[in-house]
């Protein structure tokens, strides 16, 4: 398997088109994580089906968030994407998120070339309000059966805020 952190970088952050690797498809309750030490995908746990992912979930190569893992991405598509693929993705915002007291932000992206939607999603405001509510609810409660109250969606940020989060994560990667 390719080591995504060696063959890919974060992409064109200033231009708003980044590289994202898919870990978890929409609808999956399998918590699949990239193990950067082994350069493989690893099944971390199986979550209750009620907390299946409401969107595809992945990471941005050569980044480190404040929690020590690669920076997460929420990938909005009409159908699930396969674990292990990467895509050029357009940055449309950021979900400011805290998990058990640690910053664990999620960059919100869509495919850079989405002919199915006619590239209709360019900002968070373009997404259906119901989807934003579902994402907010999911990430506020998905750990409630194990340890209630440990996850908090603090706010949603625009493209510029998302780019700053990505740039900080790239710098953390470079400094490691």
Image (cartoon, rainbow, N blue to C red):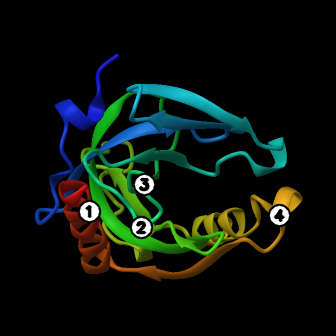
Q: Which residue is mark 4?
A: 147
Q: Earlier in the sequence, mark 3 or mark 4?
A: 3
Specify the label residue 134 is tagged with: none
Quarter holding the C terminus? bottom left
Q: Earlier in the sequence, mark 1 or mark 3?
A: 3
Q: Which residue is mark 2?
A: 66
Q: CA distance from mark 2 to mark 3?
A: 14 Å
Query: Residue at 34% of width from left, 60% of height from top?
Result: 120
How many C-alpha atoms fall within 10 Å of the one at disc 1: few (<14), some, or many (≥20)? some
Q: Measured along the vertical axis of the image, is residue 42 above or below residue 153?
A: above
Q: Which residue is mark 3?
A: 73
Q: Earlier in the sequence, mark 1 or mark 4?
A: 4
Q: Which residue is mark 1?
A: 172
| Quadrant in the picture for residue 86 | top left
Q: CA distance from mark 1 to mark 4?
A: 29 Å
In percent of width and height, residue 64 lies at 34, 57
Q: CA distance from mark 4 to mark 2?
A: 21 Å
The residue lying toward the viewer, choosing from 108 and 128, is 108
Q: Secondary structure at mark 4?
A: helix
The residue lying toward the viewer, choosing from 35 and 73, is 35
Image position of 18 (left or right of 75)? left
Query: Residue at 27% of width from left, 56% of height from top?
Result: 90
Residues at discs 1 and 4 in contact (Cβ within 8 Å): no
Q: Earlier in the sequence, mark 1 or mark 2?
A: 2
The residue lying toward the viewer, choosing from 80 and 165, is 165
Q: CA distance from mark 3 to mark 4?
A: 23 Å
């Amino acid at each position: 398997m390719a080591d995504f952190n060696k063959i890919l970088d974060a992409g064109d952050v200033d231009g708003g088109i980044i590289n994202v690797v898919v870990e978890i498809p929409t609808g999956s309750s399998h918590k699949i994580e990239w193990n950067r030490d082994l350069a493989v995908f690893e099944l971390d746990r199986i979550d209750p089906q009620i907390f299946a992912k409401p969107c595809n979930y992945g990471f941005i190569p050569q980044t480190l968030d404040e929690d020590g893992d690669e920076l997460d991405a929420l990938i909005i598509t009409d159908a699930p994407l396969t674990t292990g693929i990467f895509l050029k993705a357009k940055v449309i915002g950021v979900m400011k998120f805290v998990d058990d007291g640690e910053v664990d932000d999620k960059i919100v992206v869509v495919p850079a070339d989405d002919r199915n939607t006619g590239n209709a999603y360019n900002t968070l405001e373009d997404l259906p309000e119901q989807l934003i509510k579902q994402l907010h609810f999911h990430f506020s409660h998905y750990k409630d059966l194990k340890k209630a109250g440990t996850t908090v969606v603090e706010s949603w940020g625009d493209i510029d805020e998302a780019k700053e989060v990505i740039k900080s994560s790239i710098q953390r990667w470079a400094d490691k």
